[in-house]
Image (tube, rainbow, N blue to C red):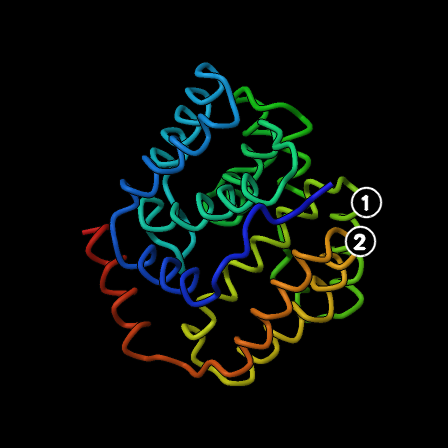
Amino acid sequence: MFFLKSNPSIFKEKKKKELSMLKSPDGLIKSFLKESSLFFSKRDTEKINDLLKFILKTKASNPYHPSMYGYISHPIRVASYYLKFAKKPCLDYVFISLLHNFFEITSFKEKELIENGFSKKICKAITTLTVDRKLEKKKSYLNNYYSKIESFSKNLALIKCVDKLDNLLAVKIICSNSERLNYIRDAEEFVYPITKRMSKDLSEFFKKIIHFSYNEKHDESFKKNVEKFNQKLIN
């Protein structure tokens, strides 16, 4: 069901990821809408654009991500990966890709999103993807969390895989060596097996990123530049 339409370069993807964390998302939004138009009708592409506008006008309430304008590059990249890796992309799952961390970044709850006109399926999928940060270090919780995602649908499992993939590309932003290694190990233990059940190409690409990430060291200069950029956006 899923495949890589090309063989991405880890170095190129890493560079694009890092640049996306240090510049305005306007160019990325424009490129993503153009990419979306290759898969969907003009009307559906306009719906995606309306969703992006909705996300951008929503206030961020997460201290680690104080600016929705600065943060939106990540969900756009996740949605872009979804378009690239899915054999037949589904509009609902493009929405879910763009909203995958919405509950964690904003003060919205599932009920409020439904009241804003989103389907129960989309809202339930976002709830399923939302991690309980108080339990995220417990193996039993993670086993159950990833099991629920994979049971929900293959599309949702793919979104989680590319979400983790995109985060691994900038793992050097994590200060603590132990936290960084634990993040990579969890990706290898819980997400990599899902990619193997989906696609040989996807799993091989994911495995390469994991191996690459193990050699990454914390980059304080990069972290400060990202913090400076985000601060500039909320001032």
Tell me where residue 226 appears, x and y as whole percent: 29, 64
- Residue 66: give its label: none
**184 or 144, nearer to the observer:** 184
Q: Residue at x 47, y 46 (%)?
A: 75
Label 2: element kind:
helix
Q: Position of residue 218 (x, y in %)?
A: 41, 81
Task: Report, in whole angstroms, how far the alpha carbon at label 2 lies from the one at label 1.
Answer: 6 Å
Task: Give residue 9's position: percent from left, percent from top.
Answer: 47, 62
Question: What amino acid type should be assigned to the residue bearing mark 1?
Answer: Ser
Where is mark 1, residue-wise? 151
Left/right of residue 46 with respect to residue 189 in the rendered view? left
| Crowding at mark 2 (Cα within 10 Å: few <14, some 14-19, many 20+) | some
In depth, the one of 105 and 154 nearer the eye is 154
Residue drawn at 57 percent across, 37 percent down:
109
Q: Residue at x 53, y 76 (%)?
A: 212
Which of the pair 114/182 is nearer the observer?
Answer: 182
Q: Residue 84, located in which quarter of the rendered image?
A: top right
Determine whether 42 is above or below 227 in the image.
above
Q: Residue furthest top?
A: 43
Left or right placement of residue 101 versus residue 62 in this view: right
Q: Quadrant of the N terminus?
A: top right
Residue placed under numbered mark 2 in the picture: 147
Q: Quadrant of residue 188?
A: bottom right
Q: Residue at x 59, y 25 (%)?
A: 114
**Residue type for callout 2:** Ser
Instruction: Count the labels in the image.
Output: 2
Label 1: element kind: helix
Q: Dot 1: few (<14), some (14–19), or many (≥20) neighbours within 10 Å? A: few
Asked if the residue at tag 1 contacts the one at tag 2, i.e. Cβ–Cβ closer than 8 Å, the answer is yes
